[in-house]
Image (cartoon, grey):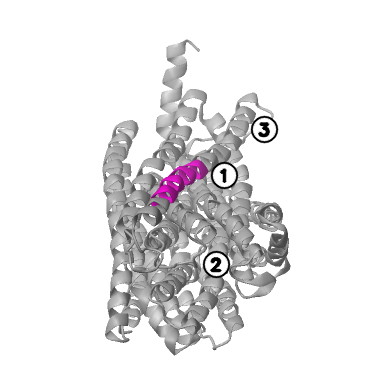
Amino acid sequence: MYLLIYGSAALALVTALIFAKKVLSHPIVGTPEEVRKFKEISGAIQEGALAFLSAEYKYVAYFCLAFSLIIYFALGHTNEGLNAGLYSSIAFLAGAFTSTIAAFLGMSIATKANVRTTIAARTGLAAAFEVAFSAGAVMGFGLCGLAIFGMLSICLLYTHLIANPLVAMEMVAGFGLGGSTVALFGRVGGGIFTKAADVGADLVGKVEAGIPEDDPRNPAVIADNVGDNVGDIAGMGADLFGSLAEATCAALVIGASAAAVVNYLPALYYPLLVSAIGVPVCLLTTFFAKVGENAASVEKTLKHQMLISTVVMTIAVYFLSQWALLDSFTLNEMIISRNGIMIALLSGLWGGLIIGYATEYYTSHSYQPVRKIADASQTGAATNIIYGISCGYQSVVIPALIVAFVVFLSWSNAGMYGIAMAAIGMISTIAVGLTIDAYGPVSDNAGGIAEMCGLEKVVRQRTDILDAAGNTTAAIGKGFAIGSAVLTGLALFAAFLTRSNITTLNLLSPTVFAGLLAGTVLPMLFTALTMRAVGSAAFAMIEEVRHQFRTIKGIMTGEGRPDYRRCVAISTRAALKEMIAPGILVLASPLVFGVCFGSEALAGMLAGSLAVGLVTAIASSNAGGAWDNAKKYIETGVYGGKGSETHKAAVIGDTVGDPLKDTSGPSLNILMKLMAILSLVFAPFIQSAHAWLLAALGF
């Protein structure tokens, strides 16, 4: 069993290495002047991305070290003499370190693949797709390999050192907390960076100056391309790493509370076995990633990646379950069968696919919702925004109902353990999901490089086809990440109840209901803080771009050179400053609320934040994706095409949607998961501190 899991991790890492070599095997070719421009522009993007991540993760490292000390002293020793604080803090640092490595891995290859995708687009659409897809696969498989290897290693170490398997798995939960903490800064900080640059570049460049998107005369254009990498690749990677680690931790904690599971190791490690078997399934799926030279084949191929991986994974799960699972066992007085666990897992797996297709319907310009937004743009930006908001709200219905159905089905068949397995099922094909998601920013960067280097129009047309499909796959990826975040949050919520010895929650209890209402506020406040952060950072960027247009002689004729580095520096400073308030909100809320009002009130708060976080995140993400692709649809030539009044209205709508789809919406994933994993890890501290507080107040 251990060899199977480690072998799967090794296969994932070797696959990532092979895809990386495949990307780098494409030479940077052209005329001497073209090669100079290729290297200069791609080098500037790579330098900016590395500079931001290095600055951001330096502060993340300081924070993680400080927070590990808080964990150490807060948890301390248990009644049995176990140093829970030490074990949890070590697991926390291990998770944070592994997540950081995964983020840098994906970002480094993406910044090398963008220019190679541009050059390949001169040959044809299929060649460009192959490079971009291979770059995405490096992130997808590399992250899976690191996560599986890290999780099994920490599990084996702790079960060897700690006699009680349940206590050992509770200590392992710190690994998920570390991954999610890094994801908080990666998602929020990267989202603020990318949208500050994007909004500044769009409003001043396209709307005010009337120059094309990714025009080299725009000082914010390099910062915009940098943002695609640090937000949508490094940030998304850290987010899904957190989901995988946290869902696995939740399932391990819940499963270890059943004596029969503890005594049969394949059943105990079944959550890791599912993730492990997903690697060869996803690798097999990539062999079907072939496109032709027509635009429709790109989006069709990416959709088929999701479907094929889901079908093959269904078959693999059946045979894995027959070998690894017990016929039945008792957990919290509920008899759980092998078939019940399989139903829970497969409901999450297929639920994720349906959420992906529903997201595609509301965000792709191949369908009516986005085309209606484009049509509404003919009467101005106001109607474009009205239709976009409507589309975002309506798009919530199917995913929310699917999540509700998955929760009902998995809970009915396997209790709290079923919820955790549904979450793992939804992210069991994460290698493919992250591959098609990371493919998008690479394609977007490729189009920007083609524009900045002044290449022939057919190159930009091909990269735009890849980018339009990438916008849809990015939206699908965000919908997939949100759905898995909710299920992961629910699984962690169930594990928190298990660790806190809470068997039922009474919604008629004033304490629980008050907590529920308090929880509904948090996603809204978090969204407000992140939106305001983007607005504040974008204001500084807009002023800088306007200043350079005014003061640099010959900038509009191409004779003057914009100061790209200054714009990158502005986005970096703004992101590092503005991510503090949302970060404090997420990290402090569960601890303060739990200590003040108790574990049951905290459970109510977690439930409220999950419910509101789900609908807010999906509405925000899908509205932004719909606005973006409505603009892309107009740029194909309908309603006057680029430069028309309809296009200008769509650009404004897209600018409004940018922080919703790339900052606030995706960042809510972290809020839902991080508050739940914090509550799980700090459950003993919350209970003891609350009891001490009550005694001190005389209650």
Where does residue 237 sit, x and y in percent of width and height?
A: 42, 60
Residues in magenta, as a range: 530-544
Q: Secondary structure at mark 1?
A: loop
Report the quarter where the N terminus lies: bottom left
Q: Mark 1 or 3, which is nearer the eye?
A: 3
Three-letter amino acid code at the position of disc 1: Asn
Where does residue 54 sit, x and y in percent of width and height?
A: 27, 54
Q: Nearer the viewer, residue 526 or 259?
A: 526
Three-letter amino acid code at the position of disc 3: Leu
Q: Where does label 2 land, which residue?
A: 471
Three-letter amino acid code at the position of disc 2: Asn
Residue at left offset 44%, top offset 50%: 542
Taking the image as shown, residue 459 lies to the left or right of residue 304, namely left
Check contact, mark 3 vs mark 2: CB within 8 A.
no
Q: Where does label 1 land, which residue?
A: 332
Q: Quadrant of residue 609?
A: top right
Q: Nearer the viewer, residue 419 or 132?
A: 132
Q: Quadrant of residue 561?
A: bottom left
Where does residue 592 sit, x and y in percent of width and height?
A: 45, 28
Gap in Å between the C-alphas at discs 1 and 3? 21 Å
Taking the image as shown, residue 638 lies to the left or right of residue 145, namely right
Disc assigned to residue 352: none
412 above or below 632?
A: above
Where does residue 427 sit, x and y in percent of width and height?
A: 51, 62
594 above or below 129?
A: above
Q: Is residue 583 magenta?
A: no
Check contact, mark 1 vs mark 2: CB within 8 A.
no
Q: Nearer the viewer, residue 406 or 609?
A: 609
